[in-house]
Image (cartoon, grey):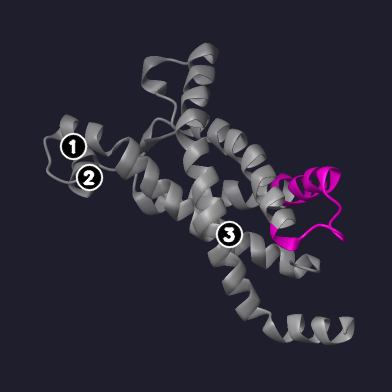
Amino acid sequence: MPRNQFQRMIFALLTVIVTVHAYVFYSLYVVNGPTFMEITGEGSVLKAINAMGGVSMFGKMMPIWAIILIEFVCAYTLEVVMGSPCSFKLASKVFDPRSTNPVIFETAIICATVGLMCPAMSFIAAFMYYPYYAGFNFLTLLANWLKLVCFNFPFAFFTQLFFIQPLIRTVFKFLFRKDIKKREEQNV
């Protein structure tokens, strides 16, 4: 859908903005929320996080906004450098973009992106959220990474396929409607 580098960067930016917020919410509230509430005795996840003084990242307690900012930078960099270019190439190896139904081709790109980004971002998260207070062990890092992939992959697949990418494509079409209309008129 994006036709030039500027549009690709905007598409990646929109995707990462929505995705990082979704994953931080999923990780803090759905996956870890009950544990946070049990540890602190608080009745809500947000109160539990505040009672703990934030979320542990790199062995230090950080506020949620810092977590979102750090994850955003990592995800955007990874998406621009690896996710978008490699997922298009992988989808193009299976389907010809010129003759394949656009919905099928976009679905293949989404699946390839999830297949690349989920393990990569889960590894980065395993490193960032590693329990450094217990000392560092490479096997523990790998175990944490595998656990995160198992938690994140189903969430990533279904949210990207059925919620995030349709939303981002709609927003993108709205933002670049003049360019898209001009391109469609040239193709007629």
**What's the residue at 36%, 21% (across, down)?**
133
Q: CA gap, disc 3 to disc 1? A: 32 Å
Residue 37: mark in rendering:
1
Quarter of the image where one finds residue 100: bottom right
Label pair 1/2, CB-CB below 8 angstroms: yes
Query: Closer to the N terminus: mark 3 or mark 1?
Result: 1
Q: Split into 4 quadrants, where in the image is the N terminus?
A: bottom right
Residue 86 magenta: yes
Residue hosting label 2: 45
Residue 165: mark in rendering:
3
- Label 3: state its secondary structure: helix
Amino acid at the residue labelled 2: Val
| Residue 182 screen position, x and y as percent | 80, 86
Magenta part of the protein: which range? 82-103
Amino acid at the residue labelled 1: Met
Along the horizontal axis of the image, is 68 left or right of 3? left
Q: CA gap, disc 1 to disc 2? A: 6 Å
Amino acid at the residue labelled 3: Gln
